Amino acid sequence: MEMKSFTKKQWIKFSIATILYLLFTLWVQNAWLLLGIVVLVDIFLTNYIPWGAWRESKNPKIRAILGWIDDIAFALIAVYFINIFFFQNYQIPSSSLEKSLLIGDYLFVSKLSYGPRVPNTPISFPLVQNTFPILDSNSYIEWPRWGYKRVAGLGKIKRNDIVVFNFPAGDTVAVKVQNPDYHSLVEEIGRERIHLDKATFGDVLYRPVDKRENFVKRCIGMPGDNLEIRDNQVFINGVPTEDPEHAQFIYYVETNGYLFTEDNFRSFGVSKVDRRLLTTNDQYMLSFIGFSPNAVGQFNPVYRMPLTKAALDKVKSLQAVKNVIIEPETLGGDKYYPVNYNNGWTRDNYGPIWIPKKGETIELNEETLALYNRCIKNYENNTLETRNGTVYINGEVATSYTFKYDYYWMMGDNRHMSADSRSWGFVPEDHVVGKPILIWLSLDKERSLFDGGIRWNRLFRMVHAD
């Protein structure tokens, strides 16, 4: 039998493709990928499978249709691998990181910065997080499902990094009511009602880690840190930290009768959705905050709005401004993590709380079970139950637990308007997606295209340039 001979050009193409493929396989550290070399042999050398046979069709319409299919398939595969291993696009949907990142900022998120994850759900449609918008069905197939693995990256998470991650409390979702999250709903109204009242809450779904919604916050606490918030000041291991440059809090601003103009608000950096003029219906609130009626028995105009330190200084410098008060703790307000344990922690006074670190061991008691049971059960996939005062993990008696993952504490720069780790707790290392590196587009939806609708000064700006 005569051996098939190959040209020098074929060998060169095959060698280059194989070297690149082997380097990729070594990086991902998955020996099963070596089977792909068989495909490369056939594509570049043997050609037993007629990969491009459609190009020989005598029907131009068939060639055109199959050509489009070939191009689309190649583009989807390329986007799939780029999206998983290199970078993805992300749009800022909320104001939790203002003024560091603004609603309408479009980001390139680097997967290489912290090392890309091997997907938990490898068979999925690219550029769709979990649900097809029109079909209202999963954009991924449940099987196969792989465990957590992160390949080598360019660095590690550092304190004050802005990080994109999968929402930890998004493991279980009531489709029609996703805010507050499912676990908070269970504490408020009970699991039975949520599962029975499908008209209100819809189906209850479980989502794999990589298909949970993407969030973006600033990493305030690192694994092993003790974190505490006292009167809005964050302390790490007992030492006060410096707020981010663009951190902002909500203030009530009283004027001497003057009503702010749109130009005023733009100079303060306050959007329409973030400001409110209190009315006569808010007299009880105004009195509670600390404002008093004027000489004629009426309250002066009072605005509620978030301000950075620079904007606060600008507001206080105006002659029309009479008084500025930071928003006090909300009476009967939101519940904070852990929602099923009454420790008196609030938005502005929280902790102290220890952030779990891989390899560290805790004693199991009522408090630590309240703080870390989600880490033990939901994130590290153990069974956990308490019977007659005895704790069982995976069916065995346990008095302590050693963590398998590192955890992080994420907060928004918009401290009074951010649902963050104070609300839903720790972010496990396997939930970390990547690091925003570049703002490639920024749109202000409150302004027209020719009146600042495109924020030209933010285009192609590095996210961490500050």
Image (cartoon, rainbow, N blue to C red):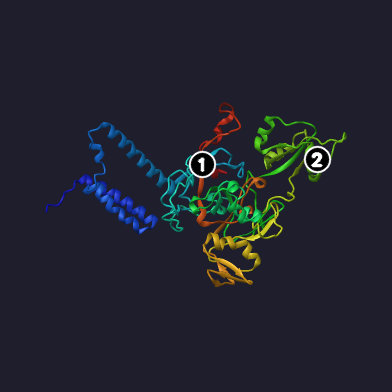
The residue sitting at the top extreme is 450
In the displayed structure, 407 sits above or below 97; it is below
For this view, does 80 lie left or right of residue 409?
A: left
Q: Which of marks 2 and 1 is nearer the N terminus?
A: 1
Residue under pointer 2: 283
How far across and how far down the image is residue 145, in percent? 43, 56
In the displayed structure, 346 sits above or below 376; it is above
Does residue 363 appear in the picture of this structure? no
Secondary structure beneath dot 2 equals: helix
In the displayed structure, 448 sits above or below 435; it is above
Closer-to-camera residue (51/102): 51
**Quadrant of the rendering where the N terminus is positioned:** bottom left
Residue under pointer 1: 107
Q: Which amino acid does label 1 sit on?
A: Leu
Front position among marks 2 and 1: 2
**Callout 2–callout 1 Cβ contact below 8 Å:** no
Closer-to-camera residue (187/415): 187
Does residue 154 appear in the picture of this structure? yes
State the residue at coordinates (59%, 27%): 451
Count of picture labels: 2
